[in-house]
Image (tube, rainbow, N blue to C red):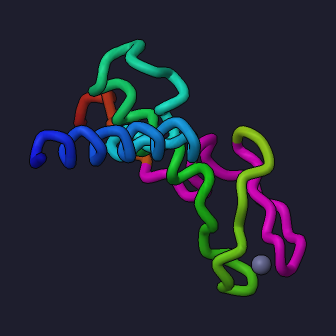
Amino acid sequence: MIRIIHLLENLAEWRCVFEMGRTKKVRTTGRFGPRYGSTIRKRVAEIESEQKAYHKCPNCETRALRRVAAGIWECKKCKMKYAGGAWKPFPSVKIRSSAPKA
Ligand SMILES: [Zn+2]
């Protein structure tokens, strides 16, 4: 009896994956299926969640900044357009100086 319940639970889980078109761990990268390896899919999911999320607008301070295209961000509230990072509006860039110190 317990086995049957387990089987039904597994079936329900699979139906969830198929019908709702999403997965638990790899989120948006579930569309790649088992391809490319889990580490890469996880990293892509991390970046995609940033790129699809609403960010804080520097003009009206509302969380309404959305990505229009690579490097272009638009606030849905005040309609301001910004040039920013490709995947996030304010990328944290580490500037490494290769110039030797005098
Ligand atoms: Zn705004």
Q: How many marks?
A: 0
Residue 47 visible (yes or no): no
Residue 75 is a magenta residue: yes
Q: Which residue lies furthest to the left in this view?
A: 2
Residue 73 is situated, as x and y percent measured from the top left of the image, at 75, 56
Q: Is residue 65 above or below residue 22?
A: below
* Viewer-closest of 68 and 72: 68
Q: In which quarter of the image is the C terminus?
A: top left
Residue in the picture at 36% in, 39% down: 11
Tell me where residue 83 appears, x and y as whole percent.
74, 52
In the image, farthest residue toward the top: 35
Q: Which residue is drawn at 12% across and 40% down?
A: 3
Magenta stretch, residue numbers: 71-92
Q: Nearer the viewer, residue 95 or 64?
A: 64
Residue 19: where, in percent of width, then height? 57, 42
In this view, 76 is above or below 71: below
Q: Does the magenta stretch include residue 26?
A: no
Q: What residue lies at 20% left-to-right and 41% top-to-bottom?
A: 4
Q: Is the magenta stretch mostly helix, strand or loop?
A: loop
At 28% from the left edge and 27% from the top edge, which residue is drawn? Answer: 39
Spot occupied by residue 5 in the image (x, y as percentages of width and height) = 20, 48
- Rendered position, 11 above or below 100: below
Inspect this view and state whether residue 51 appears: yes
Q: Say which of 17 and 66 sits in front.
A: 17
Looking at the image, which residue sits at the far front?
A: 1
